[in-house]
Image (cartoon, grey):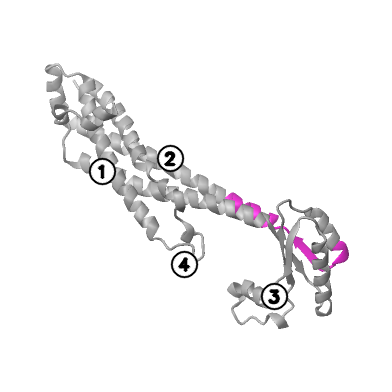
């Protein structure tokens, strides 16, 4: 069946106009939809990686914020570090230096923030071991022995971020589904227009004994090849555009990570085959429906 579709029948191919607006409409639609599908796929994969990274990195880290008078800050910090060193499941704990805290506040307050002269809480970074630790037990012990310590395991703002990334990933897949349906609709319209324009030719073919299957096969082959050709061009253009985006190493941010990584570059390759399959079934259905109405 696939070989017959590729080889075709020169006599049957004459039924379908080789040029005209239906040809350009099919090529343009398939190319444009494939281009958009590449970006939708890149969005889905990028948000999937983002959600996984946020879930893994934030789940393995926590922060202790110590707010105390200046004369007690060092003592309470040492007490918190001592408790963390005795807590099973804590792989590493360290107090951030003034330079590190200044770097965290710099995006909001500027580079000249006088950290040493301001009552800024002392931050302690806690790295969780693979087996994890009892967060609630640690929170209660800190509350009892270090009055100025507040334990934050990032759960409050980690979950919304991961949930948002998951929804963006779902939106990407929904976009691909809508692109597929739009492609089918546009190719169906183009096939119907070509069939209507060749109604007289179809009538003559029927008079000489041509079957509807023979006529429909010509339309299916021509429109499938057109869609496949346009989708290949659109997919390559989309991959080139994704490749031209700034990498995550050149600039930080979500959009700079919008792309494919490693074997992910193989993910867009099935898009032309999907477009060809959509064109095949859409044209086939439109052809047999239209042939019933042609007298």
CB contact under 8 Å: marks 4 and 2: no
**Crowdedness near tag 3: few (<14), some (14–19) or many (≥20) residues, C-alpha within 10 Å:** few
Mark 4: which secondary structure? loop
**For this rendering, which residue is in front, 35 or 90?**
90
Quadrant holding the N terminus: top left
Does residue 146 show up magenta in the picture?
A: yes
Residue located beneath label 3 in the image: 97
Marks 2 and 3, the one that precedes in the sequence: 3
Q: Residue 63's quadrant in the figure? A: bottom right
Residue mark closest to the camera, 1 vs 4: 4
Q: Residue 187: percent from the left, percent from the top?
A: 29, 37
Q: Residue 5: percent from the left, percent from the top?
A: 25, 30
Residue mark closest to the camera, 4 vs 2: 4
Viewed as shown, does residue 75 lie left or right of 157? right
Residue located beneath label 2 in the image: 177
Residue drawn at (25%, 26%), measured in percent from left and top? 290
CA–CA distance in space, label 4 to label 2: 32 Å
Residue mark closest to the camera, 2 vs 3: 3
In this rendering, is residue 148 above or below 157? below
Magenta highlight range? 143-164
Residue drawn at (61%, 76%), measured in percent from left and top? 109
In this rendering, is residue 88 above or below 122? above
């Amino acid at each position: 069946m696939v070989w017959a579709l590729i080889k075709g029948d020169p006599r049957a191919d004459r039924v379908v106009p080789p040029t005209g607006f239906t040809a350009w409409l099919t090529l343009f639609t398939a190319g444009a939809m494939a281009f958009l599908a590449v970006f939708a796929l890149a969005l889905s994969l990028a948000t999937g990686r983002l959600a996984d990274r946020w879930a893994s990195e934030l789940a393995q880290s926590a922060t202790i914020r110590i707010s105390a008078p200046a004369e007690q800050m060092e003592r309470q910090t040492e007490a918190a570090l001592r408790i963390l060193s005795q807590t099973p499941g804590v792989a590493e704990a360290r107090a951030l230096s003034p330079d590190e805290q200044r770097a965290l506040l710099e995006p909001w307050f500027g580079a000249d923030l006088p950290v040493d002269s301001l009552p800024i809480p002392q931050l302690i970074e806690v790295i969780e071991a693979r087996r994890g630790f009892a967060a609630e037990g640690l929170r209660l012990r800190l509350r009892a022995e270090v009055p100025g310590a507040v334990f934050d395991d990032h759960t409050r703002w980690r979950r919304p971020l991961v949930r948002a990334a998951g929804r963006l990933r779902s939106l990407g897949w929904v976009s691909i589904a809508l692109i597929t349906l739009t492609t089918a609709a546009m190719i169906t319209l183009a096939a119907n227009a070509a069939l209507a324009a060749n109604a007289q030719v179809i009538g003559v073919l029927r008079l000489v004994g041509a079957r509807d299957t023979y006529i429909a096969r010509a339309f299916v082959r021509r429109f499938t090849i057109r869609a496949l050709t346009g989708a290949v061009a659109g997919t390559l253009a989309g991959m080139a555009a994704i490749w031209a985006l700034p990498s995550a190493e050149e600039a930080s941010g979500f959009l700079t990570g919008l792309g494919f990584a490693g074997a992910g570059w193989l993910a867009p390759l099935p898009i032309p085959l999907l477009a060809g399959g959509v064109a095949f079934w859409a044209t086939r259905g439109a052809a047999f429906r239209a042939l019933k109405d042609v007298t």
